[in-house]
Image (cartoon, rainbow, N blue to C red):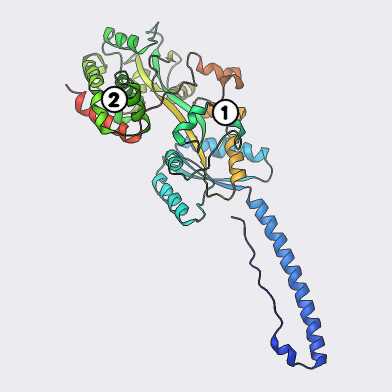
Amino acid sequence: MPSRTLGRSLAASPQSKRLPRSARSAAALLCAATLTMAASACSSSSSSSASVGGAAAHHLTAYVSGDTNIQKLWEDIVVPAFEKANAGYQVKVVFSAHGTADATTLAKLQAAAKTGRDPGYDLMESSVTLNAATAGLLTKVSAKNVPGLKDVDSALLGPVANSAVPYRGSSVVLAYDATKVKTPPKTYDSLISWIKANPGKFAYNSPATGGSGGSFVETTLDRHLDAKTLKTFQNGYDASLESKWDAGFKELKALNKDVYGKGVYPNGNQAVLDLLAKGQIELAPVWSDQYLSGIQNHTLNSGIKFTQISDPTFTGGASYLGVLKASKKQQAALKLADFFLQAQQQDAIVKQLGAYPVIPASKLPAATAARFNGVDVGNLRAGYSGQTSSDMNNLWQQKVPGQ
């Protein structure tokens, strides 16, 4: 925070009235000199304080968590570019590997908001940004204070109550071995038909161990839900409605004999990608960013392609960064948030993270946009809310495998 100078009023001592006239004259001269020096010192101090305050207003602290690729994006790519483009701005990144400090940081921010204290951070990007947004800890955003949002689908602001900036996206897509699968499924129904016609060649991880398997399960369940119930599952929680999943769980149970290993469900997103890379399966739901990173890092060979199914699509969503409402550096923090939406930074985000851009692909270099051929990167179907998703995972474990 900017430093503040506390001033004190100066008063003549009552004892000066009892001094001789000459002494009083000397004292008056001394007092006048002292007041002049004090005023000068105060003026100098105020000027210095204003200068420090002005600079400090451009010095930001961001709390960031995730894998090392997120750390690299902030510390090695976006922040240096931002500081270069904006003279006098500085950004300190406080990074928490894998979000180990997320819960304690959220608690700290909530406590600071209640007491009116400095939260210690001006921006945040972590797994608890959504929680901070819905708790009212973050600044409301729009194209007025974050101009780049004019190019972003406004629907992405819904999950965060217009209180955080979506800056990258991802979704679950269908990856396949193009050397063996010449015509990949394009709809959910054709996917199920393919699985049954090619037993053992499809896999999805257990939903509790990763979102790609969870998305396949959820997509199956969603086909049996009415629109009102689906909206409740996406935005709220009502356990009394979960019996409506029974038809979907029955459908998933019937697939046991047709999936990899006649009912073997790998442990985690990466385990499914590994099966695909080794040729043990030919088709699987995977996260788009993991797929793109695998192609870029050559852990997946060029014969592994991806596509997007419809009716319905798999689920997806955005990642967000938020400006702390209690930050005293709103203008500077919003400026940095907006910087993430510039085409050059979106291009870097795609390359570094294998993520979807949140601005139109037409604004990116042609080679970058070509990565998403065949996939509508703007179509990010929302998943279930936290507690609903947890219940789904538990019920899947009870109703589907090993039966």
Task: Name the residue type under label 2.
Answer: Pro
Marks 2/1: CA–CA distance: 33 Å
Q: Is residue 254 visible?
A: yes
Task: Name the residue type under label 1.
Answer: Gln
Residue 274 locus on image (x, y percent): 35, 22
Give the vertical position of 133 relative to 27 (above or below): above
Q: Which residue is mark 1?
A: 346
Give the vertical position of 178 relative to 402 (above or below): above
Residue 10 locus on image (x, y percent): 69, 76
Q: Which residue is mark 2?
A: 266
Residue drawn at the location 70% of the way across and 60% of the way down = 48
Out of 221 and 394, give the one closest to the viewer. Answer: 221
Q: Residue furthest left?
A: 403
Residue 18 locus on image (x, y percent): 74, 93
Of the residues under marks 2 and 1, which one precedes in the sequence?
2
Give the vertical position of 303 relative to 34 (above or below): above
Give the vertical position of 283 relative to 56 (above or below): above
